[in-house]
């Protein structure tokens, strides 16, 4: 089964959340011309911009890039401290995925997202 494109998912999320391209640009700091390229399917967001867009739209990053997962983000309260000691095992599992399910580039993207959110969570937990 073919994944839905980033452009298509971005349009769906914006329609569902009633958010315009201009609002995404303003709230993320991403240029309006680059946002327009995302909408047209000319470009795909890298990890950092993907994260910013997903934050604004409050959607799951993996869903946004076309994977068959829930659109909903996993939300945890700041009082729920998680044990992230198994992050390496998560990354190993990603690398074990069959190339039919996810190519090498997408595996690297997902691992980078795991690392990014692991660091982000650690910083947030230090602030609490």
Image (tube, helix red, strand yellow):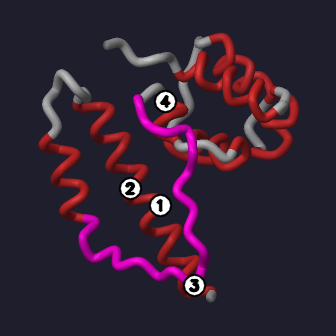
Give the residue drawn at x 47%, y 17%: 4
Which is nearer the eye, 77 or 32?
77
| Residue 23, magenta (yes or no) | no
Q: Do the CB atoms of the residues marked 2 and 4 lie less than 8 Å apart? A: no
Q: Is residue 111 above or below residue 34?
A: below
Image quarter for residue 33?
top right
Give the residue drawn at x 54%, y 32%: 64
Q: CA distance from mark 1 to mark 2?
A: 5 Å
Q: Which disc, if any, is residue 79?
A: 3
Q: Which residue in the structure is indicated by mark 1?
A: 117
Which is nearer the eye, 22 or 75?
75
Q: Which residue in the structure is indicated by mark 2?
A: 114
Q: Which residue in the structure is indicated by mark 4?
A: 65
Quadrant in the picture for the C terminus = bottom right
Q: CA distance from mark 3 to mark 1?
A: 17 Å
Q: Do the CB atoms of the residues marked 4 and 3 lie less than 8 Å apart? A: no
Other-residue count near label 1 (Cα within 10 Å), few / some / many at <14 / 14–19 / ≥20:
few
The first of marks 2 and 3 along the sequence is 3
Mark 2 residue element: helix
Other-residue count near label 2 (Cα within 10 Å), few / some / many at <14 / 14–19 / ≥20:
some
Q: Do the CB atoms of the residues marked 1 and 2 lie less than 8 Å apart? A: yes
Q: CA distance from mark 4 to mark 3?
A: 30 Å
Mark 3 residue element: loop
Mark 1 residue element: helix
Task: Tell me where the magenta segment starts and ends, as one range.
Answer: 68-87
């Amino acid at each position: 089964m073919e994944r839905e494109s980033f452009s298509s998912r971005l349009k769906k999320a914006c329609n569902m959340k009633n958010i315009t391209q201009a609002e995404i640009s303003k709230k993320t700091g991403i240029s309006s011309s680059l946002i327009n390229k995302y909408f047209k399917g000319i470009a795909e967001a890298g990890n950092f911009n993907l994260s910013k867009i997903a934050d604004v739209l409050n959607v799951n990053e993996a869903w946004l890039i076309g994977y068959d997962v829930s659109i909903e983000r996993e939300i945890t309260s700041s009082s729920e401290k998680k044990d992230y000691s198994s992050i390496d095992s998560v990354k190993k599992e990603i690398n074990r995925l069959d190339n039919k399910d996810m190519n090498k580039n997408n595996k690297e993207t997902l691992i980078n997202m795991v690392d990014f959110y692991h660091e982000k969570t650690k910083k947030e937990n230090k602030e609490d």
